[in-house]
Image (tube, rainbow, N blue to C red):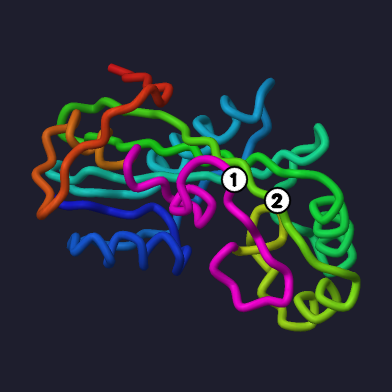
Amino acid sequence: MRLVLASTSPRRSRLLRDADWEFDVAAPSSEEIALDTPERTVMGNASAKARSVQATCDALVIGADTLVVCDGEVLGKPRDREDARRMLALQLRYPQEVLTGVCVRDVRRDRELIGFESSLVVMKGDTEDLELYLDSGLWEGKAGGYGIQDPSGMEVVLMNGERDNVEGLPMKLLRRLLSLAGFEYPNSTPSEGDDVLRVRP
């Protein structure tokens, strides 16, 4: 089976490369939607991304979507610098939950396996650190306006959950979904756990 990553995120590609998996990259063409809960939103968007790319019949297409929830507000990708400043200032005051939905679309069987992962993080820093990060431009295109892997004066501390999830692709969950789809991956073992999973026939 061939893997196709329905994302142009360099962070997601790096996580797959670090797992020594061979894969193709395809840019998704779906519009992001907002559903009644953050969990349903990230799973729905992950599914839409996986379905939006063309793939051969032997492919497993991976879609992923990440949101940050802070003080009851859902934070997606900032519209501009001012929006990023507002999001980051909020996250310096309150802990945040990072949610990533993952969909594995089995093209041959015309079915989807979907789940999500949640992590809790806190951000530490001051106004000067925030402005330096904004100047770097690293906030662009990232849910919540930051990346835990970015060099920054602001410290992002993982309190609970998986770091891979905060980077945008929870690998333990992905391994479980790929295993259920029959994918044989090198040097890895499917994770056990209680992630929410759903199979769409």
**Amino acid type for the residue under numbered disc 2:** Val
The residue that appears at 20% across and 37% down in the rendered structure is 190
Q: Nearer the viewer, residue 199 or 50?
A: 199
Please tell me the numbered disc located at residue 122.
2
Q: Is residue 17 shown in magenta?
A: no
Which residue range is magenta in the image?
A: 148-173
Q: Position of residue 198 (x, y in %)?
A: 37, 19
Q: Nearer the viewer, residue 42 or 149?
A: 149
Badges 2 and 1: C-beta atoms under 8 Å apart? yes
Q: Nearer the viewer, residue 57 or 47?
A: 47
Left-right relation of 101 to 41 = left
Where 70 falls versus 138 (above or below)? above
Q: Position of residue 22 (x, y in %)?
A: 18, 63
The residue that appears at 80% across and 52% down in the rendered structure is 91
Q: Position of residue 56 (x, y in %)?
A: 18, 48
Where 81 falls versus 48 (above or below)? below
The residue at which mark 1 appears reads as 159
The residue that appears at 80% across and 81% down in the rendered structure is 132
Neighbor class of circle 1 (other Cα within 10 Å; few <14, some 14-19, many 20+) is some
For the residues marked 2 and 1, what is the alpha-carbon distance in whole angstroms?
A: 7 Å
Please tell me the numbered disc located at residue 92.
none
The residue that appears at 48% across and 37% down in the rendered structure is 101
State which quarter of the image contains the C terminus. top left
Q: Is residue 150 shown in magenta?
A: yes
Q: Position of residue 41 (x, y in %)?
A: 60, 31
